Amino acid sequence: MSRPPHRDYAGAKLGMWLFLFTELILFGGLFLLYAVYLARYPHEFAAAGREMHLAFGVANTVILITSSLLAAMAVTAVQRDDRRTTLALLGGTILCAAIFLVDKYLEWGAEIGRGIYPDSPRLAAGPPGESVFFSLYYLTTGLHGLHVLIGGALLAVVAARVKRGAIHPGDYVWLENGALYWHLVDLIWIFIFPLYYLVL
Amino acid sequence: MAPGKQAHYIMGYGQLTTVWLGLLALTALTVWVSRHDLGIGHVWGSLAIAAVKGGLVIAFFMHMRYEGRLLRWLLFLTLVTLAIYIGFTFFDVLYR
């Protein structure tokens, strides 16, 4: 006698949200460090902030907001039992993740080329506030970039499961939780963008 | 539709696209504000716009608007926790 496998939809989603709350606290700690050092070195932060390229920040913001839209649409598509659209939308989200990382590579490459990286001779010779700014910048965007990479990989797994038929209108919690993780990546960037690219 | 007893609200593509347009407009606004030095309100203004954008993402893209009380309260609790440790750190840092 076979019974249907045990499913706890609300529990699965609650678990995902609890994890996302810990992620918010994690990045919240980095934002707190930023705020404390901004209060301590306002002039050095302003000087360092002028080294940032707004165009990269704006491009990455638009890419992530759009990818979030595609991920949210993918959830709607699976609820409507439209597998082809779901896969196309997930593919679009993963493409956005890849473009974001290429963009980040170009941005970091340009900065490292100008001698801006943790413990570089240029930063070591400059005022301490500037090296603090760039250390926090690399730590925060690096950790965020890692989340983009993990999110993209997670959504690729989700897409494979949609293709196999393991995710369908009767059971799509994998897709929903994958999309939630992706939205968190977008949410964190929404705060990184003004702090590092705009306010200084 | 969904497993379990609860009915699931399905967000339309149009509704999601409207939220996306709102997010793009707020992004344009925050860049515009930062290019026009509006004085001390600058940092707080940028953070306020970011908070509105974050609220839109959580409410619509993450479906929080259609979730039950438990998740909403947990979100509230998380934000209060964050506010407490940011606030208490500044009580220390600002008055040393």
Image (cartoon, grey):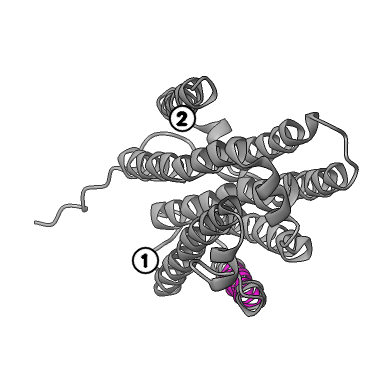
Q: Is residue A160 above or below residue B68?
A: below
Determine which quarter of the picture holds residue A171: bottom left
User: Mark on residue A166?
Assistant: 1
Q: CA distance from mark 2 to mark 1?
A: 38 Å
Q: Residue A49 or A26: which is nearer the viewer?
A: A49
Residue that numbered label 2 is attached to: B82
Number of numbered discs overlaid on the protein picture: 2
Residue occupying image coordinates x 75% and y 64%: A53
User: What's the residue type where badge 1 is placed?
Assistant: Ala
Q: Is residue A102 above or below residue A170?
A: below
Q: Residue furthest right?
A: B36
Residue occupying image coordinates x 54% and y 67%: A83
Evaluate if marks 2 and 1 touch, with contact meaning CB atoms under 8 Å apart. no
Q: Is residue A196 left or right of residue B80?
A: right
User: What's the residue type where badge 2 is placed?
Assistant: Leu
Q: Determine if the magenta segment contains residue A97.
A: yes
Location of the N terminus of chain A (image quadrant): bottom left
Q: Residue A193 or B43: which is nearer the viewer?
A: B43
Q: Is residue B39 above or below residue B21?
A: above
Q: Nearer the viewer, mark 2 or mark 1?
A: 2
Measured as percent of width and height from the top left, residue A60 is found at 68, 63
Magenta highlight: main SS: helix
Q: Chain of mark 2?
A: B
Residue B36 seen anywhere in this rendered image of the structure: yes
Q: What is the magenta range?
A: A91-106
Q: Chain of mark 1?
A: A
User: Mark on residue B18?
Assistant: none
